[in-house]
Image: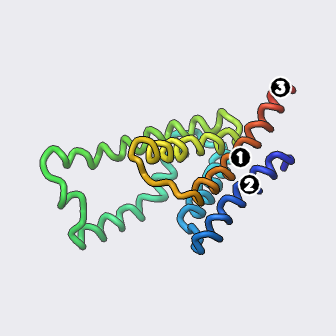
């Protein structure tokens, strides 16, 4: 790892550790989501599979778990098939299409850009959600979360800086 990439990791870790120290709780879901995306992206990058085939194989792997979950919901009376009526029932198959298209585009795109850029782009969505919550929905912002967010974004800026330096050399 290059020096600026190490600084990125350090600042991101400091941001997360700061929140853990302040709230005395480990953000298990956030850590798992971040780790799962990192592993998913690394595996996708290393496999030499066509995007469509890759998505098909992923779908095959998760289908049994999805069917078990659907059966569980059906038994407990919380299934979408029991809740949705009439034209709303058409949303069920549409959900598959709406989910598959972004995954297919991601699968194609991740192979065409450097992996570091994929990681940086993953900060765009949470940042936009953060800004929407703050300015549009007027959600309160605690200073501790702002400090942690700042550490993480400083780390991202180090990565961007490193990559800009490398692009200028080319």
> Residue drawn 25% across and 46% down?
91
2 and 1 marks in contact (CB < 8 Å): yes
Give 170 or 146, whichever is nearer the viewer: 146
Q: Nearer the viewer, mark 3 or mark 2?
A: 2
Crowd class of label 3 (few under 14; some 14 to 19; many from 20; radius 10 Å): few
Crowd class of label 2 (few under 14; some 14 to 19; many from 20; radius 10 Å): many
Residue 138 spot, x, y in % from top left: 41, 47
Which one is earlier in the sequence, the residue at label 2 or at label 1? 2
Disc ID at residue 11: 2
Crowd class of label 1 (few under 14; some 14 to 19; many from 20; radius 10 Å): some
Which residue was labeled with disc 1? 154
> Residue drawn 41% across and 58% down?
63
The answer for how far apart the CA atoms under marks 2 and 1 are is 7 Å
Disc ID at residue 98: none
Give 109 or 10, whichever is nearer the viewer: 10
> Residue drawn 28% across and 68% down?
73
Which residue was labeled with disc 3? 168
Residue 102 spot, x, y in % from top left: 47, 39
Could you tell whether 94 is left or right of 37 in the image?
Answer: left
The color scheme shown is rainbow
């Amino acid at each position: 790892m290059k020096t600026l990439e190490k600084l990125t990791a350090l600042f991101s870790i400091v941001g997360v550790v700061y929140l853990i120290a302040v709230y005395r709780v480990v953000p298990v879901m956030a850590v798992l989501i971040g780790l799962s995306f990192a592993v998913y992206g690394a595996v996708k990058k290393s496999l030499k599979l066509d995007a469509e085939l890759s998505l098909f194989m992923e779908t095959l792997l998760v289908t049994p778990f999805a069917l078990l979950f659907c059966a569980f919901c059906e038994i407990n009376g919380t299934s979408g098939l029991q809740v949705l009526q009439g034209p709303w029932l058409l949303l069920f198959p549409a959900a598959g299409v709406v989910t598959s298209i972004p995954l297919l585009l991601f699968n194609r795109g991740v192979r065409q850009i450097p992996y570091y850029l994929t990681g940086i782009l993953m900060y765009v969505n949470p940042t936009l959600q953060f800004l929407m919550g703050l300015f549009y929905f007027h959600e309160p912002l605690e200073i501790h979360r702002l400090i942690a967010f700042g550490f993480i974004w400083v780390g991202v800026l180090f990565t961007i800086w490193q990559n800009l330096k490398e692009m200028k050399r080319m």
